[in-house]
Amino acid sequence: MPLSSAGLAGGKASPFWDEYDCLAPRRILVRIKGIFHERTSLRRQRGSFFDDLVARGGLKQGFLAVRTSTGKPIAFITVHEAGNAQIFVGDSCGPNA
């Protein structure tokens, strides 16, 4: 799954809060990528209801892509260590009021 905003609309994210609702099928694909300053690894962390996979360290960049199981893009988000972020969403998404 590409980490790309192609086919989506958006741009600079709010420094305070952005929230969107998206109509999506029951099954979706999610890809997460983090670029860290130093080598790190995913570790399992036990939670109250389910376990999490956690990578600890200073983050340079982070990416999140969400698509349908057929590959149609739903959302793409980037974050950077400088504090800026971008959010791109598909036609099935709208701001949550």
Image (spheres, grey):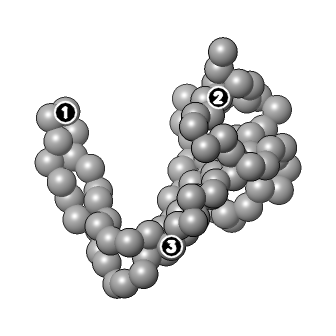
Q: Which residue is mark 2?
A: 20
SS for dot 2: strand
Give the CA distance from mark 1 to mark 2. Answer: 25 Å
Give the CA distance from mark 3 to mark 1. Answer: 30 Å
Tell me the kind of residue under disc 1. Phe
Q: Is residue 27 above or below residue 33?
A: above
> Would residue 68 be found to the left or right of residue 53 on screen?
right
Residue 23, horizontal then vertical, whole percent: 67, 24
Q: Nearer the viewer, mark 1 or mark 2?
A: 2
Q: Tag 3 or tag 2, which sits nearer the N-term?
A: 2
Residue 42, horizontal then vertical, whole percent: 29, 68
Q: Which residue is mark 3?
A: 60
Q: Is residue 68 visible?
A: no
> Would residue 26 be found to the left or right of residue 68 on screen?
left
- Residue 6, image quadrant: bottom right
- Residue 41, image quadrant: bottom left
- Residue 91, image quadrant: top right
Measuring 57% from the left and 66% from the top, which residue is drawn there? Answer: 82
Measuring 43% from the left and 76% from the top, which residue is drawn there? Answer: 36
- Comparing 76 with 10, the one in front is 10
Q: Which residue is mark 1?
A: 49
